[in-house]
């Protein structure tokens, strides 16, 4: 039985939107790691980055992940960098969470992130090139960390339904999502 789905993937792939919808369809709770960190610290992610740097953010992210995983029957939207760190993967595995990659095509991500003002990593003049490089670097790591891959459909309700299928019949859904 799966009790926690942890959604990973690149910034803009829909972890929050699809995760909320999957939680609704499952009758589970929805949790967002970035929101949890912001509440816990009383600061936005941008403020944490500018005050403590990325490494300070990552320390807080790991602590928050340990706390948030005590909730069961939950869909958890991770941050775009969470599963790039072995200590976070270890915490997720220990909790029994199933890690699912939301796989979105690069052009879709570029379009969604073009005008972003909230994500500290993207506030740079060479954003488009940077996203291309980061995508190439991170995708293999996301795949390696994940138990399953779900290709986004462009319709959050449909992508969420694939996640629900994964929870209800994990073996069958795994085969299907791998071929899409
Ligand atoms: C990050 C992604 C963000 C947030 C932080 C760092 C990353 O989450 O955790 O800005 O390293 O990709 P989203 O993927 O929800 O934007």
Image (cartoon, grey):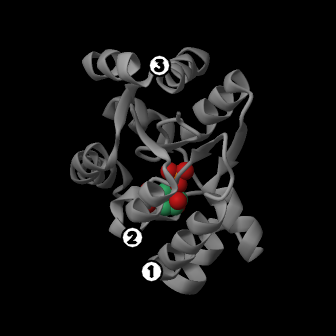
Mark 1 to mark 3 CA distance (whole Å): 38 Å
CA neighbours of label 1 inside 10 A, class few (<14), some (14 to 19), many (20+): few
Provide the residue designation for mark 3: 169
The residue at 68%/31% (across/down) is 23
* Left or right: 49 in relation to 37: left
Q: Is residue 41 visible?
A: yes
Q: Is residue 114 visible?
A: no
Provide the residue designation for mark 1: 55
Q: Is residue 100 above or below residue 167?
A: below
Residue 87: mark in rendering: 2
The residue at 46%/42% (across/down) is 98
Disc 2 is placed on an element classified as helix
* Left or right: 69 in relation to 83: right
CB-based contact (under 8 Å), mark 1 and mark 2: no
CA neighbours of label 3 inside 10 A, class few (<14), some (14 to 19), many (20+): few
CB-based contact (under 8 Å), mark 3 and mark 2: no
For marks 3 and 2, give the one nearer the viewer: 3
Disc 3 is placed on an element classified as loop
Q: Position of residue 55 (x, y in %)?
A: 44, 80
- Name the residue furthest front: 1
For marks 1 and 2, give the one nearer the viewer: 2
Of pointers 1 and 2, the one earlier in the residue sequence: 1
Mark 3 to mark 2 CA distance (whole Å): 29 Å
């Amino acid at each position: 039985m799966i009790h926690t789905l942890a959604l990973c993937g690149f910034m803009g792939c829909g972890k929050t939107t699809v995760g909320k919808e999957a939680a609704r369809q499952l009758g589970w709770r929805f949790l967002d790691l970035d929101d949890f960190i912001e509440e816990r610290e009383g600061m936005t992610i941008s403020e944490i980055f500018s005050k403590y740097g990325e490494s300070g953010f990552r320390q807080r992210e790991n602590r928050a992940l340990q706390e948030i995983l005590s909730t069961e029957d939950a869909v958890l939207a991770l941050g775009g960098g969470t599963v790039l760190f072995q200590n976070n993967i270890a915490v997720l595995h220990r909790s029994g969470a199933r890690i699912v990659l939301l796989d979105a095509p690069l052009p879709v991500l570029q379009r969604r992130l073009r005008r972003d003002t909230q994500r500290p990593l993207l506030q740079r003049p060479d954003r488009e090139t940077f996203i291309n490089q980061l995508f190439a670097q991170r995708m293999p790591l996301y795949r390696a960390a994940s138990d399953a891959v779900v290709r986004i459909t462009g319709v959050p309700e449909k992508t969420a339904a694939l996640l629900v299928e994964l929870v209800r019949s994990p073996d069958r859904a795994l085969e299907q999502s791998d071929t899409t």
